[in-house]
Image (cartoon, helix red, strand yellow):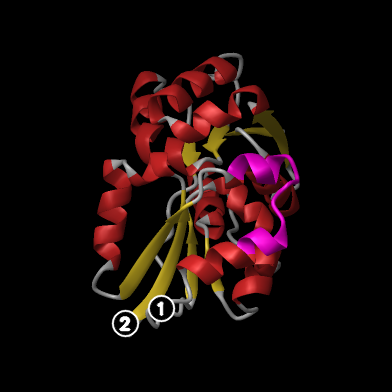
Amino acid sequence: MIKIVVFDSGYGGENFADKLEQELKIADIIRVIDWRHADIIQSSAKDARKCAEQALAAYIGKVNLIIFANYLLSTTSLNYFRRKYQDQKFIGLQLEHPCSFAKKDALILATKAITKTIGFHSFTHKLKPNFHTKTLILDSWPSKIDDGELQIDEIKECFGRSVMVDNFSPSKVIIACSQFNDIIPELKQVLGSNIEICNGTRETISEMYKTLKLRGGICKRSSALK
């Protein structure tokens, strides 16, 4: 059986692993969730890489694929792991570039650590021709989500204070912290059911198929992948 490890530091990884189990039933999905170091993994690319390397030591070279369900790690450390462990395949959740043929407003939900990376600045620069963007840095949200403490009223207050001003009306939300995938229903409730959530999940699953050289792709249940 194909063995795939999903690494993260919280419910974002659990959420992504759930979707993989729905998508690829012939695989053994191994969840390596480093809850103990969740805060430092979200706050520092260097520390995230160190924690990931320690947590994955028992799996590197022994599984078919390791997936980082963590945008900070994927943005900063994929090349490091691929160079150091050339016999192991790695992929990761990437920041998703939404499509638009006209100038649109896009809201990016992020943590401070990822906004300080070169990869994030390159990503937002590429968005400029097609999107007006606003980035909300929400460092307190990941731990609240993991602890089940983020309330819908706090989401409404944050967006009401920071988003619905200056005629900024987002049609797309770009997620840059995997924990935020766990509150997609709440985001749609606050911002409207027609809001497009861009989180890279479908693209990552497609890359998984290519990396493992499996037939298939995004299943007919694609609506479940958001």
**Residue at x 51% of width, y 50% of height:** 138
**Residue at x 35% of width, y 26% of height:** 80
Q: Mark 1 is on which residue type?
A: Phe
Judged from the image, the secondary structure of the residue bearing numbered disc 1 is loop
**Residue at x 65% of width, y 59% of height:** 154
* Residue at numbered disc 2: 103
Judged from the image, the secondary structure of the residue bearing numbered disc 2 is loop
**Residue 219 visible (yes or no):** no
Q: Mark 2 is on which residue type?
A: Lys
* Residue at numbered disc 1: 168
Image quadrant of residue 134? bottom left
Q: Is residue 151 magenta?
A: yes
Q: Position of residue 52 (x, y in %)?
A: 52, 24
- CA gap, disc 2 to disc 1? 12 Å
N-term-proximal mark, 2 vs 1: 2
Q: Which residues are magenta?
A: 142-155
Rendered-image quadrant of the C terminus:
bottom right
